């Protein structure tokens, strides 16, 4: 017999699909744009998931029994407290399917309904020509830099302080949002995968969660760029900086000063472009940072 429990809002639903017979499976699904799992406060359901169940969402899972989680054929890292994360890409299609293997070898598939999401179109003028139509030498540079950034994001660590929550890395008005279709000087380009926070050059950038600095370099498109590994495949990237306070290899704590806002790279004014990625083996996902912080706390003092 398989039993399931779904607690949801905005018509979210959950289904448990048995692959092999098992005595009991229980699932709790909660829709909460800002939610973090702390093992001591979660229900005793064998599997609990909270987060934004839309494309770009980051979902926080908790297991109360020893189980193995698989997503898209890859084994998910679960910490000793039973916590794990799952990221949904901007263009995620269909429902989320998690395969769980029990201690006795039995298997169950958990299905989560993913709600649709619409994105804005953002037109930006006054971008330098070299950033809209780079020459062959500049393109070769960007390919090399992209490879280094991917390598930085692929480093898997067991850091997990981020399960206690994120804070804003900078204060200021939001001038660009995740997922928006970008048009530079009238020419359509790739979607924007970050959250833009405007601020004066030199304004502080702090670590939104603890982690390890994996990259700190001056890159063509993103200018001075830093990547922090938060653990479990989750990383933050900070673009267009004017100064980087910490270097690759250093550990940082939540709230620690790591850099300063700038206008380096492809920009039309000073701001911080904060991006978040989730990597699981061959699965590479860009998630929306804004879902993880409280609106209103980013106001400049």
Image: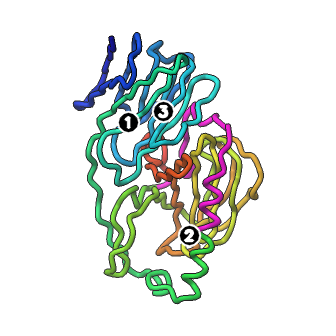
Residue closer to the observer: 173 or 113: 113
Identify the residue position indicated by label 1 in the image: 97
Q: Is residue 154 magenta?
A: yes
User: In this rendering, is residue 45 above or below 230?
Assistant: above
The answer to whether one can see residue 88 in this image is yes
From the image, state whether disc 2 or disc 1 is nearer to you: 1
Identify the residue position indicated by label 2 in the image: 222
Picture coordinates of residue 242 (x, y %)?
64, 68
Identify the residue position indicated by label 3 in the image: 60
Residue 16 bears which disc, if any?
Answer: none
Where does the magenta region start and end?
147-172
Label 3 SS = strand
The answer to whether one can see residue 293 in this image is no
- Quarter the N terminus occupies: top left
Label 1 Cα neighbours within 10 Å, binned few <14 / some 14-19 / many ≥20 = some
Looking at the image, which residue sits at the far left? 11
What is the spatial separation of the Cα atoms under label 3 and label 1, in whole angstroms? 14 Å
Picture coordinates of residue 85 (x, y %)?
51, 36
Q: Residue at x 69, y 62 (%)?
A: 216
Q: Residue at x 40, y 60 (%)?
A: 176
**Image quadrant of residue 75?**
top right
Picture coordinates of residue 131 (x, y %)?
49, 81
């Amino acid at each position: 017999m398989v039993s399931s429990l779904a607690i949801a809002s905005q018509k979210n639903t959950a289904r448990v699909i048995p692959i092999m017979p098992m005595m009991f499976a229980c699932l709790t699904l909660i829709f909460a744009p800002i939610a973090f799992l702390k093992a001591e406060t979660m229900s005793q359901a064998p599997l609990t998931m909270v987060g934004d169940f839309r494309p770009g969402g980051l979902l926080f899972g908790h297991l109360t029994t020893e189980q193995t989680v698989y997503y898209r054929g890859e084994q998910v890292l679960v910490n000793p407290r039973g916590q794990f994360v799952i990221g949904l890409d901007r263009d995620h299609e269909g429902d989320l399917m998690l395969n769980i293997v029990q201690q006795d070898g039995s298997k169950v598939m958990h299905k989560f309904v993913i709600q649709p999401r619409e994105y804005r179109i953002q037109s930006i003028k006054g971008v330098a020509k070299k950033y809209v139509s780079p020459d062959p030498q500049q393109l070769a540079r960007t390919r090399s830099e992209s490879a280094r950034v991917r390598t930085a994001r692929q480093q898997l660590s067991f850091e997990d302080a981020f399960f206690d929550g994120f804070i804003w890395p900078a204060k200021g008005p939001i001038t660009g949002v995740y997922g928006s279709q970008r048009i530079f000087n009238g020419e359509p380009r790739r979607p924007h995968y970050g959250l833009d926070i405007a601020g004066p050059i030199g304004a502080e950038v702090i670590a939104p969660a603890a982690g390890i600095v994996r990259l700190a370099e001056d890159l063509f498109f993103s200018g001075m760029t830093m990547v922090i590994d938060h653990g479990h495949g989750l990383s933050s990237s900070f673009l267009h900086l004017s100064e980087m306070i910490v270097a690759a290899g250093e550990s940082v704590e939540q709230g620690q000063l790591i850099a300063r806002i700038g206008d380096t790279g492809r920009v039309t004014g000073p701001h911080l472009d904060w991006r978040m990625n989730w990597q699981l083996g061959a699965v590479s996902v860009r998630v929306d940072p804004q879902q993880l912080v409280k609106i209103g706390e980013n106001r400049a003092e």
